[in-house]
Image: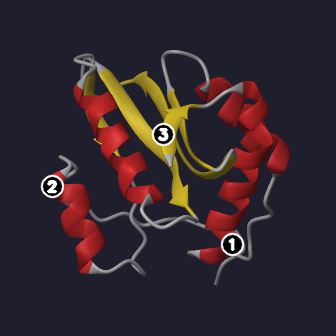
Amino acid sequence: MIIRKAKPQDIPAIVALAVESVTAIAPIPELKIDREAMRDTVDLCLQPAHLCLVAEQGGVVVGAVVAQVTRGFWFRGLQCSVLLHYSRAPGGWVRLMRSLAQWVQGRSGIKMAIIEIEDCHGPKVLRFVERLGFDRPSSNRTFIRGAS
C-alpha cells in the first residue's frame, strides 16, 4: 500500500469513499448526500494550501484523508479542518493519519487542526490520534435540521 497525493482522476474514488464513510460510520438520515458538493470540495483540497492524500493498493484507491485550511477565526494563523479520514483497507487509515499528522506538523502556519472522531470508535482510536498530536479533548454538538 502506498500513500500519495491525490490527483484529479482520483476524485471519483475519493467521493465514493466519502459516501461510504458517512453512510457506514454514523449515518444522518436527515441529510441528503450531495456527491457534487463532495467533488467540489475534494477538487478545492487538491490545491497546495490544503491536503488530499490517498491510500492506494494494487492500483486501486482504498482510503483517503482530506483537509481544508482556512484563516483562524479567533486567532492569528491557519486552521486545518479534517473533512474525511477513511480507509476500507486494513492499516490504510493508520498510515493516512500518520501522514496527515506529519503534514500538519510540517506547516508552521497551521496553529490548530481539528478532527472529528465519532463516538462509535473505541478508546484505542482516541489514544492513537492523541499520540499523533490531536490531544486536546473537546465536545462537539451538531445541529441537524429535521432531526427530532
Kindly indicate whether the residue at mark 2 contacts the one at mark 3 (C-beta within 8 angstroms).
no
Q: Amino acid at mark 1?
A: Thr
State the residue position of label 3. 3
Q: Amino acid at mark 3?
A: Ile
Query: Which numbered disc covers residue 58?
Result: none
Question: Dot 2: few (<14), some (14–19), or many (≥20) neighbours within 10 Å?
Answer: few
Q: Earlier in the sequence, mark 2 or mark 1?
A: 1
The answer to the question of whether label 1 and label 3 lie on touching residues, with beta carbons closer than 8 A, is no
SS at badge 3: strand
Residue placed at 20% from the left, 49% from the top? 132
Q: Amino acid at mark 2?
A: Arg
Between marks 2 and 1 in the image, the one whose residue lies nearer the viewer: 2
Q: Residue at x 70, y 28 (%)?
A: 43
Relative horizontal placement of residue 19, taking residue 124 as reference (left or right): right
Q: Nearer the viewer, residue 139 or 41?
A: 41
Residue drawn at the location 54% of the way across and 60% of the way down: 87
- Give the residue pinned by disc 2: 131
Q: Earlier in the sequence, mark 1 or mark 3?
A: 3
Residue 86 is left or right of residue 80, and the answer is right
Left or right side of 10 for 57: left
Specify whether residue 136 is in view.
Answer: no
Instruction: Say the numbered circle drawn on residue 23.
Output: 1
In the rendered image, which quarter contains the C terminus? bottom right
Q: Quadrant of residue 112?
A: top left
Distance between the alpha carbons at the discs numbered 1 and 3: 24 Å
**C-alpha gap between disc 2 and disc 1:** 28 Å
Which x, y percent locates residue 66? 53, 40
Q: Position of residue 48 (x, y in %)?
A: 52, 15
Give the structural element (helix, strand or loop) at label 1: helix
Vertical relation: 12 (above or below) 71: below
- Residue placed most toward the observer, 67 or 148: 67
